[in-house]
């Protein structure tokens, strides 16, 4: 067999074998010729003993070439595995049999082959497309050899209420089928076009090579014809047997998925995870049907293989993940014993039944400064119970995923608490992600139900978001049919009012999933973060203990997470009049109106919101100022909060203690510090009286129940170690351990594995250091570290220094050039804004360079932009990766355009 035209394939892998057939499609005594790619001989030549065998089965219209990266990885002496990648009969370079082979025949054929190979365990099956169903059929028939299952973009069952994908319907159409799949090579070309990025010409040629000529493509057409579109199809029983048998498979499983697939979309992944709930899942955003071409799947497959219990584990040994002594003593204190579990809604019933029952519990403001809607504690408790009963009758139950596309306020509060009381999993992806990001998040979470306002339901209809649709308000019949809406929250609450009494209990599995909350998307595609009921309750308790927020507190929530935590804390919460997708739309008057409505004592707002509050304070009335004078605590997080900004806020809120907790969607909060403590830290940093103070944003000490440490940075800007430390002055990736840290990233196994590679710790992806007083200083993101010649540069310290210059609003450092030799570029947003982006004028560039140099950073170029590219949710996190690409283009002589 000539392999020269197969890039990435070693000649010794290619082999043929004659196999006696026991298939009903063949006459007795028939022997079939199979082609394989098999690295077994190579392993033997190298003297390597494989840990097991990967049995790889391609789909239609590919061949064993699909698995070439697994073959190469399996030959690595560090983790040798035999990889047997088959060409199914009538496909690739195997024999053209002249028979029509159905699913049951192909499963049987694969068993004949493994018998001929004397293939024994341990065997891990790997399948793609219809090779997934065939490999699983083999797995069910060979339980003694089977030790694992790997699946990539495949299906075993057509989800109820949905048709087969349009592309397959077209390929099956009598007028198209034979010409599209056999007479011409259209089906192959269309399949190859699904690669993202486009396949290189030589790779595309290798995929086409076995199918040149209609006589070589009969198997392609037969594969398509064997798709069981309904129960009358001859292969339907065989596929159903595989689908149902899968529920009994208990061996480890891994699913690697390309969601950008017009054939096997996320709905098929959802069906598979329902049948294999223990499977590890990773969705490669941007990848499609040919996920093995779009992304490196060999690395995750072998990482997964060696992480299984029966094979030596990689990563950091558990006993090595200990904190080095140093810094503030409380860091090394053993974590306190967790308190008895109280569900998130624990305080609601008590508030409703107690003396505060008739007092306001939750409110939302209208643009004219009046209260648009409100509920007292009794009403809130009753509305939650009624809606929960109605949702249960509609089919929402334990484990159901419910996407909440509702702005913060009364409706969202009632819907969220009703869902968690039922044991459903709420999916919260806010509109701040933008249409593209929001659509990607919702589709990836595959909700069973979608509760939304009219605008969200219209988007769901146009963009194909999954889930049975429930409107917030009752809609006209025509509109309801147009949007595919089944019912409304109002109707469900009415239907539940008569049967909520006694039907709901406070019993919930503390370790069951409760919520999927999406990150802001400021450092890549937004990630779903899975929380259990225990972790949400721990978040509530941490906030209460750290900030002293008790039942009866009155909270203005300019940030959605705290609006939802309010009832759990027993605190009155009000949502100010603002666009929740743009925090910078919060005005001073809107903040004051909200504070006055409930006599607020606490405010939570992002730095971007605070900037606009200060910018609009001239319009504040005397009554508004009196309302703000009553604020006792302000919390601001989401991005670094400069001390000058806080000092201005202090003048607006003269009685408030200003705190800037540091945290993230995965763990909120992690540390805390007050304005006075920030000012003291800055003085000590300037004076040099506290070792390690300076070069970053001081975010204070760990919050109640949390431990924080760092993994030191290496010379290449990574944090590869296994030993967390808290030694003063050591810069590294920040780690956190706390009861309220997330359970996992949702269907992002690779990212979860990386974030939890040190047992008991979450790797935040931020970098920072401790000073001798035990305070944490954040220096930026690990992904934004610049590796200059002979130096690793973290951005935040120099950025803050530059932002103190007159005429500078925001600054960001970015690296340009190859890793290890990068030039540091400062990108500045000025006041007033620059008319166009490009190189800075000398009168600005000079001070920026000298200021950065005093902060220990040599800046090679200074560029200006009218506005920094920031995330939508916080309007504060600068996309430095995007700036780096833009700066590279500008410095290479390209048109500046918009970063």
Image (spheres, grey):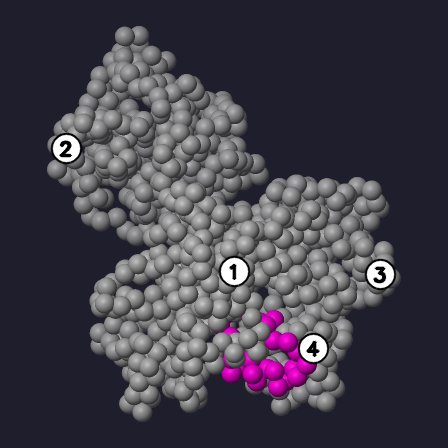
Residue at 45% x, 53% y is 323
Q: Mark 2: give few (<14), some (14-19) or many (20+) Cα within 10 Å.
A: some
The image position of residue 137, as x and y in percent, is: 42, 24
Residue receiving disc 2 = 11
Nearest-to-viewer mark from 1 and 2:
1
Is 881 displayed left or right of 742 in the figure? left
Q: Is residue 777 above or below residue 98?
A: below
Q: CA distance from mark 4 to mark 2?
A: 75 Å
Question: How far apart are the two marked residues, 1 and 2, measured between alpha carbons?
Answer: 61 Å
Name the residue: 81% across, 58% down. Answer: 351
How far is disc 4 from disc 3 in space, using C-alphas?
Answer: 24 Å
33 above or below 448? above
Tell me where the magenta segment starts and ends, as one range: 635-659
Circle 1 or circle 4, nearest the eye: 1
Q: Which residue is mark 1?
A: 329
Residue position for label 3: 357
């Amino acid at each position: 067999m000539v392999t020269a035209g197969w890039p990435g394939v070693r000649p010794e892998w290619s082999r043929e074998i004659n196999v006696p057939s026991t298939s009903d499609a063949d006459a007795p005594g028939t022997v079939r010729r199979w082609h394989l790619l098999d690295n077994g001989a190579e392993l033997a030549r190298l003297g390597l003993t494989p840990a097991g065998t990967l049995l790889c089965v391609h789909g239609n219209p590919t061949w064993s070439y699909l698995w070439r990266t697994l073959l190469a990885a399996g030959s690595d002496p560090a983790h040798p595995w035999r990889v047997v990648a088959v060409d199914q009969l009538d496909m690739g370079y195997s024999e053209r049999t002249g028979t029509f082979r159905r699913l049951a025949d192909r499963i049987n054929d694969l068993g004949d082959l493994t018998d001929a190979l004397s293939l024994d365990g341990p065997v891990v099956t790997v399948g793609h497309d219809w090779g997934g169903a065939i490999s699983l059929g083999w797995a069910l028939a060979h339980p003694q050899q089977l030790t694992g299952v790997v699946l990539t973009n495949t299906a075993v069952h057509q989800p109820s209420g949905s048709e087969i994908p349009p592309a397959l319907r077209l390929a099956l159409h009598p007028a198209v089928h034979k010409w599209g799949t056999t007479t011409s090579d259209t089906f192959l070309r269309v399949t190859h076009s699904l690669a993202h990025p486009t396949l290189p010409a030589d790779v595309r040629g290798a995929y086409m090579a076995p199918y040149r000529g209609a006589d070589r493509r009969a198997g392609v057409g037969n594969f398509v014809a064997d798709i069981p579109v309904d129960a009358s199809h001859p292969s339907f029983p065989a596929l159903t047997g595989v689908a149902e048998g899968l529920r009994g498979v208990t061996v480890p499983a891994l699913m690697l998925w390309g969601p950008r697939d017009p054939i096997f979309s996320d709905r098929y992944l959802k069906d598979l995870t329902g049948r294999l709930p223990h499977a590890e899942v990773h969705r490669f955003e941007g990848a499609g049907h040919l996920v093995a071409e779009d992304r490196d799947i060999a690395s995750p497959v072998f990482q997964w293989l060696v992480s299984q219990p029966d094979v030596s584990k990689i990563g950091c040994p558990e006993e090595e993940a200990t904190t080095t002594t140093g810094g503030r003593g409380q860091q090394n204190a053993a974590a306190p014993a967790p308190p008895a579990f109280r569900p998130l809604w624990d305080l609601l019933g008590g508030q409703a039944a107690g003396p505060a029952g008739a007092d306001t519990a939750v409110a939302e403001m209208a643009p004219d400064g009046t209260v648009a809607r409100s509920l007292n504690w009794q009403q809130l408790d009753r509305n939650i119970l009624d809606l929960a009963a109605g949702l249960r009758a509609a089919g929402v139950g334990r484990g159901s995923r419910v996407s909440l596309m509702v702005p913060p306020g009364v409706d969202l509060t009632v819907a969220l608490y009703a869902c968690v009381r039922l044991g459903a999993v709420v999916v919260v992806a806010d509109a701040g992600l933008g249409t593209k990001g929001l659509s990607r998040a919702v589709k990836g979470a595959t909700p069973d139900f979608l509760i939304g306002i009219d605008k969200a339901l219209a988007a769901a209809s146009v963009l194909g978001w999954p889930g049975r649709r429930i409107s917030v308000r009752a809609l006209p019949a025509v509109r309801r049919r147009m949007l595919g809406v089944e019912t409304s929250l109002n109707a469900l609450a009415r239907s539940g009012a008569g049967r909520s009494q006694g039907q709901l209990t406070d019993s919930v599995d503390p370790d069951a999933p409760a919520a999927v909350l999406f990150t802001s998307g400021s450092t890549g595609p937004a990630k779903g973060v899975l929380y259990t009921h225990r972790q949400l309750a721990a978040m509530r308790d941490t906030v209460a203990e750290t900030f002293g927020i008790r039942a009866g507190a009155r909270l203005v929530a300019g940030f959605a997470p705290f609006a939802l935590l309010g009832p759990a804390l027993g605190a009155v919460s009000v949502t100010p009049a603002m666009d929740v997708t743009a925090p910078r739309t919060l005005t001073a008057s809107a903040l004051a109106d909200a504070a006055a409505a409930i006599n607020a004592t606490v405010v939570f707002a992002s730095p971007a919101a605070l900037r606009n509050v200060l910018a609009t304070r001239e319009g504040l009335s005397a009554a508004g100022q009196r309302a703000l004078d009553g604020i006792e605590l302000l919390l601001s997080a989401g991005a670094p909060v400069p001390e000058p900004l806080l000092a201005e806020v202090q003048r607006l809120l003269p009685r408030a203690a200003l705190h800037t907790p540091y945290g993230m969607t995965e763990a909120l909060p992690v540390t805390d510090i007050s304005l006075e403590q920030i000012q003291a830290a800055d003085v000590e940093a300037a004076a040099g009286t506290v070792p390690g103070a300076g070069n970053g944003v001081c975010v204070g000490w760990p919050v109640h129940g949390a431990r924080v440490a760092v993994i030191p940075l290496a010379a290449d800007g990574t944090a590869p170690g296994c030993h967390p430390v808290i030694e003063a002055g050591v810069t590294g990736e920040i780690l956190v351990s706390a009861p309220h840290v997330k359970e996992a990233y949702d269907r992002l196994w690779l990212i979860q594995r990386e974030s939890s590679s040190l047992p008991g710790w979450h790797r935040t992806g931020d970098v920072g250091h401790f000073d001798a007083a035990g305070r944490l200083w954040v220096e930026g993101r690990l992904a934004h570290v610049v590796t200059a010649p002979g130096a690793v540069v973290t951005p935040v310290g120099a950025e803050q220094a530059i932002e103190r210059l007159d005429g500078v609003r925001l600054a960001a450092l970015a690296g340009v050039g190859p890793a290890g030799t990068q030039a540091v570029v400062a990108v500045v947003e000025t006041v007033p804004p620059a008319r166009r982006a490009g190189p800075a004028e000398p009168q600005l560039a000079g001070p920026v360079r000298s200021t950065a140099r005093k902060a220990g950073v040599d800046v090679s170029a200074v560029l200006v932009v009218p506005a920094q590219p920031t995330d939508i949710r916080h309007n504060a996190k600068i996309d430095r990766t995007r700036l780096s690409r833009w700066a590279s283009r500008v410095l290479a002589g390209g048109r500046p355009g918009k970063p």
